[in-house]
Image (cartoon, grey):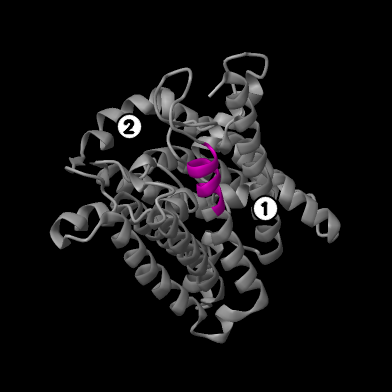
Amino acid sequence: MQEIDLKALTTQVLWAAFGLSVLFGAIAQRTHFCTMGAVADVVNIGDWARMRMWVLAIGVAMIGFNAMVALGWIDAGKSLYAGPKLIWLSALVGGAMFGFGMVLASGCGSKTLVRIGGGNLKSLVVFVVLGVAAFATLKGITAVARVATVDAVAVTLAGGQDLPSLLAPATGVAKASLALLLGIAIGGALLLWSLARAEGRSADNLLGGLGIGAVVAGVWWVSGVLGHVAEDPNTLQEGFVATNSQRMESLSFVAPIAYALDWLMFFSDASKHLTIGIVAALGVVVGSAIYAVATRSFRWEGFRNADDTANHLVGAALMGVGGVCALGCTIGQGMSGVSTLSLTSFVALAAIIGGAVAALHWQMWRIERMA
């Protein structure tokens, strides 16, 4: 492949990822798609409607990803999530930190971007603090602590940590076939649960669940199929264009926010390039803003008081540090990662939900104490 072709392919990948993320932002703004909100609705008022929408999206992404594995288009082991190293402690601790932080900050990384598009200045502050904390945990002072502590506790598996790779030797079934079976079985069960009640079949729930899940699967295709290069002319090795990890990627909103800040601050540095993660973060803001302006729901919003400001600052920092330790957020691990059937992703997702539930109970305790 000639270099000019590689540049053209990179442009195609970036525009495709941007377009899908604009769609993500518009859908999320329209349907109030929010993991933190879904958990809060269950804990605070016993309403499972948004939780069903979120679970529906996971099921759709899981079926879509594993269908592509079965077709031989992509391989979970070439993603960030399904490698042989099971960093269970990082996922557990980082996920809990992220879950607790997203409650304090009024939403996860994706919700922060959606809120920015709707005029929320609090979320703009969260975006900056989350990005700085995430970058420090990728390459700075907290990165040193991360590598020396939670990342040091891991289990290295013989093959990949995705369920098809783990079960294929014991069952004798081909990994691609197992991926399809497990993807349909687990993803299908999630779909059935989501649609079992009328609240899960509302127009917004169907749009949010089916739409967001399809977008996540679509970005997997963009990165893993469209952006796949059998032999990169620069390295002479297999590669995936326009990714920060040099692996196949889908949507995630912690490290990409850090890379977006880095790209903005060092824009004139020729070594800084746009990636799927960076354009996706921008696309979500644009999509949300387009819908908010079109429906006249765009509203400026700021902090209520010093306590509100402090909560958002602490929450943003926890999300930045925790999201990098856990290798993702409610979208990065909760959808993109879980769709690969990665063990680390399941651990991270459980920890994120646990951290969010703990934070919600802590908030209720504070309110009752003040009363």
Does residue 263 appear anywhere in the picture? yes
Quarter of image, res 280: top right
Observer-nearest of 88 and 211: 211
Range covered by the magenta-colored residues: 218-227
Residue 148 position within the rendered picture, expressed as x and y whole percent measured from the top left: 26, 28
Q: Is residue 14 left or right of residue 75?
A: right
Does residue 304 appear anywhere in the picture? no
Observer-nearest of 255 and 100: 255
Q: What residue is shown with label 2?
A: 146
- Of the 4 image quadrants, the one containing the C terminus is bottom right
Which residue type carries mark 1? Answer: Gly
**Whole-Å distance between the Cαs marked 1 and 2?**
31 Å
Which residue type carries mark 2? Answer: Arg
What residue is rendered at 16% in x and 62% in y?
171
What residue is rendered at 39% in x and 53% in y?
69
Q: Is residue 214 left or right of residue 73?
A: right
Q: What residue is shown with label 1?
A: 25
